[in-house]
Amino acid sequence: MHKQIAEVVDALEHAERRLEKLAETIPAERWNVRNDPDRWSLAECVAHLNLTSEAYVPRVRKAIAEARQLPPMTKREYRRDKIGLLFSVMVGPLPLIAGFRIGRVKTTPAFVPSGNLPEQQLLAEFKRHQLELIGMARESDGKQIDKVSITSPFGERIHYNCYSTFLIVPRHQERHLQQAELVWHS
């Protein structure tokens, strides 16, 4: 497996382990409770990630199918495009400067979680999406996924290559898992 694809798989698996650890430490009765009315609950953070994965999966599948039509990848590194690089920085974990988290961005309405879903349902859905994303990352090995684009589910005018997508998704997961951890550990 190409080293960069292996790194994508590792990042997705890391996010899954991080959520499992969080599930072990936070009681189920706290999952749907906000400790601050202006911030999401732990369950809302995970529900948002599930909505995001659900939107990305068909787009990535289509891009991999397009990449299959291209000649196999030569011995080179995958490349992010400029928009993908910018987007991965924007959606990644929030930096902490002088005790304050900077870089909060509101999501689009389609990705605002609603309802109080049970912890086990959220975890099962997250795991299902992770298995699918990991499978697609492995399937993309050796294909020119940096030569095919997807349209971002966050804005129809935003396009970046499929390899960038595989970097954006786990960074976005880490951001919201960090947010989820801070709900009850702040």
Image (cartoon, helix red, strand yellow):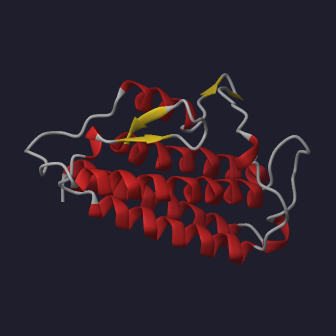
For image coordinates 68% across by 46% down, the residue present is 179
Question: Would you say 67 lies left or right of 173 here?
Answer: left
Q: Nearer the viewer, residue 158 or 132?
A: 158
Q: Position of residue 10 (x, y in %)?
A: 36, 58
Q: Position of residue 176 (x, y in %)?
A: 64, 48
Question: Would you say 144 lies left or right of 184 here?
Answer: left
Q: Position of residue 92 (x, y in %)?
A: 54, 38
Asked if residue 29 is positioned above or below residue 168 in the image, the reply reads: below
Question: Would you say 111 lies left or right of 90 here?
Answer: right
Hey, which quadrant is residue 108 in on the image? top right
For image coordinates 29% across by 51% down, the residue present is 66
Hey, which quadrant is residue 155 in on the image? top right
Asked if residue 101 is positioned above or below residue 38 in the image, the reply reads: above
Q: Position of residue 145 (x, y in %)?
A: 28, 46
Q: Residue furthest left?
A: 75
Q: Nearer the viewer, residue 105 or 13?
A: 105
Q: Which quadrant holds the N terminus? A: bottom left
Asked if residue 184 is positioned above or below residue 78 in the image, the reply reads: below
